[in-house]
């Protein structure tokens, strides 16, 4: 059998510990070789066989490392990715790809020059509810989609003391949850004509944005992306309306909660949606009829499997450089729109 690809994981905070390390460990063909962390005891409690280093450069220089995964704070995504690529490693960056479009372009240019793959961990392409919605859109079941609402609301009235809540590049909710919601819409409909955003702090003591409401405008479609931290009764995930019917979904995909609880990725029942969406279709007689929308199981390991296959030359990267740059275009346009108070047109050639 082919030897597994050796992976170095940079960062063992929430993203590295809860998401990346378990997914790497349970994706066939990958092996967690090295973790860059200042807390060896924490890493070894979970992965006693992993080598722990304090210096990312030492990990990048380690012979035999095939893939570097960046799960460090957003502000260092680009410089760490560039350093790893220059050391000859393939790179998977936790979202967002970078904190600015210029940074993202530099990462992309470095990957191209090095002849290495750089991709982004857009795991929510493999949410069960998004897989269900994607199948409906691609099959034309909803007709021409005219209105899409995508929510990621939570009730977290207390501001925690963590880097995401402190001013700095890539901090705040728009660069935390925005990449998920933007990427999903772009996967379905491509780049919008314009972006109009309201991004703000709402909680007492908030230093960065914890709310956003962003409108992506297409010729007919309007896509509304929304997230807030003061939504106690908010369970809407998707409301998508087209010329033939609607898809309504409540509740978040359960994989993050399962990972937090220590469940093994790929275990029986993994990724099954406990609250499938509702499909409302209008018959030829004009009657609206409801039924449960089919939902395939989600599996975040598919992102890692696609990265493995891209490195071995048998598939495309899970997120292409063009897709990564398009998400950054929308994120940056949203930030500029909120600051200026006006809608910003997008130039896909820029």
Image (cartoon, grey):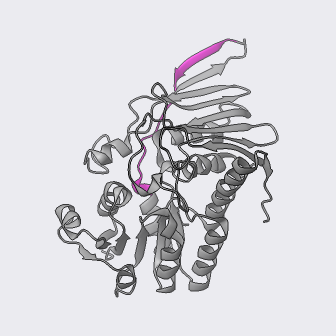
Q: Is residue 158 left or right of residue 129?
A: left
Please give the name of the residue rendered at 52% of the width and 76% of the height, measured from the top-left corner: 79
Which residue is nearer to you in this view: 296 or 160?
Answer: 160
Which residue is nearer to you in this view: 208 or 322?
Answer: 208
- The answer to whether residue 301 is magenta is yes
Looking at the picture, how far across and down is residue 175, in whole percent?
55, 54
- For the question of whether residue 193 can be seen, the reply is no
Q: Is residue 203 left or right of residue 113?
A: left
Q: Quadrant of the N terminus?
A: bottom left
Q: Quadrant of residue 212?
A: top right
Looking at the picture, how far across and down is residue 200, in whole percent?
60, 43
Looking at the picture, how far across and down is residue 281, in whole percent?
64, 21
- For the question of whether residue 89 can be seen, the reply is yes
Q: Which residues are magenta?
A: 287-302
Looking at the picture, how far across and down is residue 255, in whole percent?
37, 44
Please give the name of the residue rendered at 63% of the width and 44% of the height, measured from the top-left corner: 199
- The answer to whether residue 235 is magenta is no
Q: Quadrant of residue 296?
A: top left
Q: Quadrant of the C terminus?
A: bottom right
């Amino acid at each position: 059998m082919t030897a597994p690809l050796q992976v170095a994981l940079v960062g063992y905070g929430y993203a590295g510990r809860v998401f990346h390390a378990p997914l790497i460990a349970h994706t066939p063909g990958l092996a967690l070789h090295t973790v860059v962390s200042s807390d060896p005891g924490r890493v070894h409690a979970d992965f006693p066989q992993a080598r722990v280093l304090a210096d990312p450069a030492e990990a990048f220089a380690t012979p035999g490392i095939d893939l570097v995964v960046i799960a460090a704070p957003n502000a260092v995504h680009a410089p760490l990715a560039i350093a790893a690529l220059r050391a000859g490693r393939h790179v998977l960056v936790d979202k967002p790809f970078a904190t600015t479009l210029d940074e993202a372009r530099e990462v992309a240019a470095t990957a191209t020059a090095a002849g290495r793959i750089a991709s982004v961990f857009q795991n929510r392409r493999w949410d069960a509810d998004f897989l269900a919605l994607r199948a409906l859109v691609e099959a034309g079941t909803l007709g021409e989609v005219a209105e899409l609402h995508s929510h990621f609301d939570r009730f977290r009235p207390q501001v925690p003391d963590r880097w995401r809540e402190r001013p700095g590049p890539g901090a705040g909710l728009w660069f935390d949850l925005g990449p998920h919601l933007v990427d999903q819409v772009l996967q379905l409909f491509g780049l919008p004509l314009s972006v109009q955003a309201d991004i703000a702090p709402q909680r007492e003591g908030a230093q960065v944005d914890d709310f956003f409401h962003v409108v992506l405008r297409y010729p007919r479609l309007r896509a509304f992306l929304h997230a807030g931290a003061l939504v106690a009764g908010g369970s809407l995930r998707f409301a998508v309306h087209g010329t033939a019917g609607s898809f309504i979904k409540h509740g978040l995909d359960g994989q993050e909660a399962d990972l937090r609880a220590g469940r093994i990725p790929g275990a029986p029942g993994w990724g099954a949606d406990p609250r499938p969406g509702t499909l409302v279709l209008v018959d030829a007689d004009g009657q609206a009829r409801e039924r449960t929308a089919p939902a395939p199981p989600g599996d975040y390991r598919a992102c890692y499997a696609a990265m493995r296959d891209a490195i071995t030359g048998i598939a495309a990267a899970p997120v292409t450089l063009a897709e990564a740059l398009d998400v950054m275009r929308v994120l940056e346009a949203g930030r500029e729109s909120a600051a200026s108070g006006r809608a910003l047109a997008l130039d896909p050639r820029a």
